[in-house]
Amino acid sequence: MLAFIIQRALQAALVMVVMSMIVFLGVYAVGNPVDIVIPPDATIAMREEVIRRLGLDLPLWKQYGIFAWNLLQGDFGRSFIYNMPVLELIGGRLPATLELVLISILFATVTGVSLGIYAGVNPESRIAKLIMGLSILGFSVPSFWVGLILILTFAVHFGIFPAGGRGETVMVFGVEWSFLTANGLSHIVLPALNLALFKMAMMIRLARAGTREAMLSDTVKFARAAGISEATILRRHVLKLISIPIITVFGLELGSTLAFAVVTETIFSWPGVGKLIIDSITVLDRPVMVAYLVLTAFVFVMINFTVDLVFALIDPRIRSGRQKS
Amino acid sequence: MSPVLEVRDLRTEFFTAAGTLRAVNDVSFSLNEGEIIGLVGESGSGKSVTGFSLLGLIDAPGKITGGSVRLKGDELVGMAQPDLRRRRGRDIAMIFQDPIATLNPLLTIGQQMEMALAAHERLSPRASEDRCAEALERVGIPSARARLKAYPHEFSGGMRQRVAISIALLHRPAVIVADEPTTALDVSIQAQIVTEMKMLAREFGVAMIWISHDLAVVSGIAQRIAVMYAGRIVETGPAAQVLRQPRHPYTRGLLDSMPHATAPGQALRQIPGSMPSMMALPPGCAFAPRCAFASPACTSVPELTEAAGRSWRCFHPLDQPAQEGITS
Ligand SMILES: Nc1ncnc2c1ncn2[C@@H]1O[C@H](COP(=O)(O)OP(=O)(O)OP(=O)(O)O)[C@@H](O)[C@H]1O
Ligand SMILES: [Mg+2]
């Protein structure tokens, strides 16, 4: 198990090095920020002074070297535009995105998996057909449109939930959270639902397919023949047998939603990181873009690492280093 | 002595989109305590469905549409599922062909055994562990208590099947349905398992239905043989007699196609043709289109003829000893 962890940690480190290079080069290629940072009427001397201060006169490999060296010390540089440490800038926005994404994904997973298992156990029932119909809808309707409909229905027409913003927050561990206040929670409902629908549809499909396969397996037949009740079979056999694809998708979705919740954040004017990154791209705020992308890569790597560890905990064959049969 | 299991005119049908398929058709047999009956027949003849029907484990679109299954005197056909569940594992158990597929790879052997134990008995964790270790020991698994913590992939195929057998034996059922339990194993291990199952059946008085398409394996374990073709039992009788002197041409065909029925180097004698689709059975005897003895009478279903502990469904039962081919 320890060897497994070390091996995965080394892989993760390698991925991070490569990702940071790709991100740095990619952002470098996007455009020259000097023209945006420096007022048009600046003198040549002023201009050269700024270029020197930002380190833009150095050769590319040196710029990367400085960037990587600072990164290792936890220094992501300063935003060209806001003139404050990038980490502070992103850190101030991250909790909003984090709570929104976690709530929506947990909701999508719990309800999606439950509905999917139900549909897998009773494939011919009317409710199962309704569930599958809903999941097709969840797949095919664009997210921004669902967001608008949610606002029109629940905020404008019925007035049950607010249309945007974070609402009241409370300070816990030095960070502002919305979900801990009743008002904040009511603000989260609609954007979280908006983010959750597509993922729920996916979880329904995964859980249903897995459950159907598991219910037809000899493992379940054998358990039934031993007189084990359906409830126990679902809880102890089926749930475990379907967990691996579900955890995989959970991890992938968690990462990608954290990084790219921007559409929902924009529709519900949710002050998360999505909005920040879009703004920084339009003004070529290079340090923010680079830091954001590197952090995103880091989040993905960490999630994958965790998912692999969870696999090893669930599946003894992975733990003992054997290939899955 | 009254039989522990009495099956009368059992009928199981599948109502599929393509039509109705009668996988088990008026099957009757009975089993005494500790008796082993071999159920043989080609692939698709309805052996497994018969087994599942006995345990009441037929899922939609299938259904038991007639007949009776009496287990220790109680009627199982039509019994409510919760009551049936209480019988399964305790009075009648089943094991399957592929032990890799039957055991859950993600749970330890101990967890799976305790689950099967808890289905019928409330025991303290300690007592439950004792029972499981004991059950493993009984089927010849060394250092049983330690092995409870092992996962299925840490066992060999033969050991895995032993684990499955020990789970089936946990509650000392009166009847075990063994659906091709040795087909997936090496020949040498097959023989071991067959010998051990025979001993266990004698020791605990467990009656067994040993399903196989291999007459050679069945002849080594069963006291009686039932031959199934297209959903019907076409012949039953004491194993030795059925093998020595089959009455039904289909049984003879099966015997002739066994490797040692022909001289070495000679091609195996196959039964001509193949089993008809269960969806479109010919009227009357389903074997008639492949049978060298078929006559116009065979277009109606032959009645069961019983004589001297044997029975068959055929208008033209054989009486000459085996070996002469039925193919002309
Ligand atoms: N769930 C099902 N739905 C529809 N038809 C089924 C179903 N299960 C079995 N059948 C049909 O019932 C018939 C008997 O199948 P069964 O599995 O009992 O055969 P078998 O004698 O056990 O064969 P094998 O030696 O291959 O295991 C087959 O024609 C099969 O197609
Ligand atoms: Mg079968």
Image (cartoon, coloured by chain):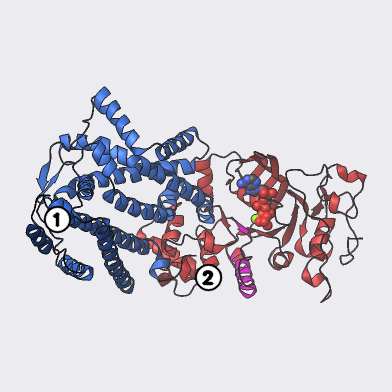
Camera sees residue A109: yes
Residue B9: image x %, image y %?
72, 43
Which chain is tinted blue?
A
Q: Residues within 10 Å of mark 2 (few under 14, many from 20)?
A: many
Camera sees residue B73: no
Indicate left or right for B125 with B190 as reference: left
| C-beta proximity under 8 Å, tags 2 and 1 | no
Rendered position, B262 above or below A304: below
Q: Amino acid at mark 1?
A: Val
Q: Quadrant of residue B208?
A: bottom right
Rendered position, B19 above or below B276: above
Eye-nearest disc, 2 or 1: 1
Residue at x 41%, y 40% (from the top left corner): A139
Indicate left or right for A34 with A324 as reference: left
In reply to whether residue B280 is colored magenta, the answer given is no
Tag shown at residue A265:
none
SS class, disc 2: helix
Residue A158: image x %, image y %?
26, 23
Which chain is tinted red?
B
In reply to whether residue B199 is colored magenta, the answer given is yes
Residue A270: image x %, image y %?
20, 40
Indicate left or right for B116 with A259 as reference: right
Indicate left or right for A2 with B145 as reference: left
Instruction: Tell me the quadrant of the picture where the N terminus of chain A can be found.
Output: bottom left
Q: Amino acid at mark 2?
A: Met
Q: Nearer the viewer, residue A253 or A286?
A: A286
Are discs 2 and 1 both within one chain? no
Measure the C-alpha gap from mark 2 to mark 1.
60 Å
Q: Magenta part of the protein: which range?
A: B175-200
Residue of label 1: A86
Residue at x 41%, y 51% (from the top left corner): A239
- The chain ID associated with circle 1 is A
